[in-house]
Amino acid sequence: MIPAAERAQGNPMSDIFDRFNTKLRPAYFVEPLFYEHDYALRFELGGEDVSTQYPIRRFIQAHARAVRIAKAAFAKSARVWLLTCDYGGEKPRKKHLKPFGEIGIRKRHFDYLGAVKCAGDPDLPDYFTHCHWHATDIWDRRHLDEALWLTLGAELGVRPTYPGPLYMVDFDRNIVLFPYDDRGMDLVALERAPLERVYHAHSDWLLEWNREEIDAVFKG
């Protein structure tokens, strides 16, 4: 999440994003992503038919759906990045990237992108003064499946887990995949074309609450 104060005053992350030579800017990562983009899909993962009383069953369905959507979204991507956002003090926490070691991505594989001040943001506790961003490119596509495991199981108690925001990004095609928890996942892009195939292939999993507005953009 890009803090509101930084959105209004200009964001130092803009300089950091220049290294990716992309049209994507920090403003495109404002949560919830679905409502901030003209071209966006919102998927239901766990589903109302699988109760949280059965966390393993719910997680299995959520992860299976997310994997299929991610594969469709990045099927034509030459390069995919993982971006993490960790809230804390002025300096990044030393061990917040440790969960990625479970999938073979070590701390040394991540580049530290920088920090965004978030002190005074009404949506965050006072002790969160900065948001620290790290990024790594995916050299093995199996890491996508495993990273989805890390982020989707947090609220269900599935371990290992990464509790912070995690984005999967194709900077060349301007696509961002954001799995927010076992309930759902947003897929956004700056153009319609990269999302059309995913929409038609997985329309049954679109969140019903947003289906009408999604269909208005992609149907037909």
Image (tube, rainbow, N blue to C red):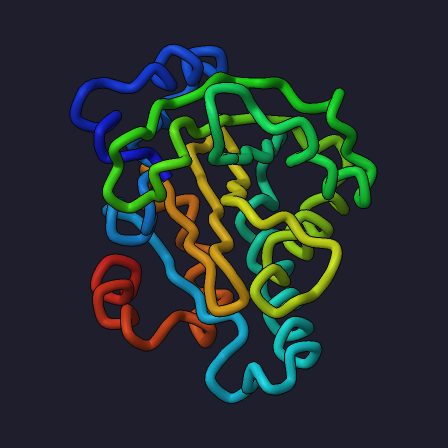
Observer-nearest of 215 and 35: 35
Observer-nearest of 89 and 160: 89
Q: Is residue 155 left or right of residue 205?
A: right
Q: Quadrant of residue 155?
A: bottom right
Observer-nearest of 196 and 140: 140
- For the point 38% across and 23% down, the residue is 116
Up-down relation of residue 131 to residue 158 (above or below): above
Q: Is residue 85 left or right of residue 143?
A: left
Quarter of the picture holding the C terminus: bottom left
From the top left corner, tell me how far across and down residue 63 is, in percent. 64, 65
From the top left corner, tell me how far across and down residue 34 is, in percent. 31, 53
Q: Quadrant of residue 99?
A: top right
Which residue lies most toward the left here?
8
Observer-nearest of 114 and 49: 114
- For the point 49% across and 79% down, the residue is 47
Q: Is residue 29 visible?
A: no
Q: Is residue 128 visible?
A: yes
Q: Is residue 99 left or right of residue 199?
A: right
Up-down relation of residue 9 to residue 118 (above or below): above
Q: Quadrant of residue 69?
A: bottom right
From the top left corner, tell me how far across and down residue 120 is, in percent. 25, 33
Which residue lies most toward the front here?
127
